[in-house]
Image (spheres, rainbow, N blue to C red):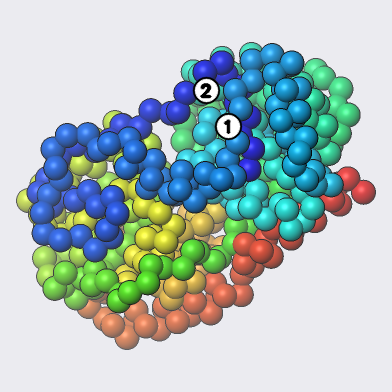
Amino acid sequence: MDDVRLDKRAPEPKRERMRGVSAHVRDRPQDTNPQTGGFTPGARRLAEADKLAIDMARERAAELERIALTAPEDARRAEERRSDMNHSHLVLPLITLGDPRRLSGGYLYHLRMSDAAPAHEARIIFLSFPEWPFPLAALRSAAVLRRSEELRASAVLVDSIAAALAAPALATRRHRVPVIAVLHQPPGGIDHGILRATAQAPLDRLALRRADVLIAASDHLAEQLVEAGFARSRIRVVPPGRDVAPPPKGPVQDLRNGRRAAFLTVANWLPRKGILELLEAFARLPADAATLHLAGDESADARYAARVRSRLTEADLTGRVVAHGPLSRENVAGLYRAADVFVLPAAREPYGTVWGEAMAFGLPVVGWRAGNLPYLAEDEREGLLLEPGDVDALSQALLRLALDRDVRARLGAAAKRRALARPTWEASAARFFGAIRECLA
């Protein structure tokens, strides 16, 4: 993977680390089998955070090439430094925002495609917009397109998270190669307030109209694009793979902690993920019903994370919830293997990779009947799907699964059968690069 930075210093994004919040919310940076104890007060070291956020610093250090480009001649020098490398047939700059190694579904999708690129005679080069306040980074849109030309691109891939920023140059420049949008969210985004979404949506649509092909990560997202006026003939659906990294070697962890069941949520702490609604529903269960495990980046939204931490300190959740923080893919797989139920009441999820991963491990899934979950699981067949916002119903569903082992087994077995019918990452990569070559034909 090549990561070509377009801001002068290309600083690493700041990570607000979790401070001590409760004796019952634990930071376990390397061990996903937490023991009784609490957070050590004080910020976690950045080195630990970097190791845990997908463990990219360790897993991909040999592949990551970070090049700060400040002028065209710098790009040429970067190409000269690559002259000894074996160039693949396809050179595919992927225009994104910020650090492409961060822990979220869209970025992981791109990293997996980057990993698979050599097997498809291709190479993905990440071109990152600086993370400036919206829409200031759009001032660099012309520079982004120039970089892709200097790299002698076969086609230019545009991440939906950066589409609005690239829109000015896409609308005004003549393109020598096809432009392919890779979409993980609809126009306007999914994590913004109404003002930002209203301002961003027209720019997103402008960029997508300039694209030759739209690669959507789910059928749900493809339907949203058609509803927004884009021709279905331009859309190719390439979902994430269902397979996860193998879990760590050794015995299966005991996540129940003496209770009847272990519930697992894998999600960054963002409002649309429904963490607060989940905690409210879980707090209504009998104390001996289940233990809830949360895995994910707590620093994605500082204000929301503060509300989650405050809720975790209340008496009705004391000793019942374990917060693991961001974990490597292997350790997340270990949690999937050891859990009894996966629950994520996300309100807006264009795909929801973690639902598919949990199902592949044989876990019944619980969530709102919203976003892409109804495309992945059917109520009472592979999981329990509830009306969005109905916390009472969510609590009753969790209680039912905590107490009824047979229902868990039936739903989990069906979930695994359905998940195994979905493509692996290898198959998804074949679809991804096949769509690109079809566009180039």
Q: Write down the residue under mark 2.
A: 10
Residue shown at the point (86%, 34%) measured from the top left = 177
Query: Residue reaching furthest front?
Result: 84
Toward the viewer: 84 or 282?
84
Q: Secondary structure at mark 2?
A: loop
Q: Secondary structure at mark 1?
A: strand
Which amino acid lies under the numbered mark 1 shown in the image of this protein? Arg
Toward the viewer: 98 or 380?
98
Residue 416, visible in the rendered structure: yes
Picture coordinates of residue 396, whole percent (x, y): 26, 67
Picture coordinates of residue 67, whole percent (x, y): 61, 27
Contact between marks 2 and 1 (CB within 8 A): the answer is: yes
Horizontal placement of 299 versus 118: left or right?
left
Horizontal placement of 225 versus 290: left or right?
right
Query: Residue reaching furthest right?
Result: 441
Classify mark 1: residues with Cα within 10 Å, few (<14), some (14-19) or many (20+). few
Horizontal placement of 273 versus 173: left or right?
left
**Quarter assignment of residue 75:** top right
108 to 133, vertically: above or below: below
Which amino acid lies under the numbered mark 2 shown in the image of this protein? Ala
Picture coordinates of residue 265, whole percent (x, y): 34, 58
Picture coordinates of residue 270, whole percent (x, y): 37, 41
Query: Residue reaching furthest bottom?
Result: 406
Residue 184, visible in the rendered structure: no
Measure how far apart labels 2 and 1 are at the Cα level. 9 Å
Q: Write down the residue under mark 1.
A: 66
Q: Looking at the figure, which quarter contains the N terminus? A: top right
Q: Earlier in the sequence, mark 2 or mark 1?
A: 2
194 to 116, vertically: above or below: above
Toward the viewer: 160 or 231?
160
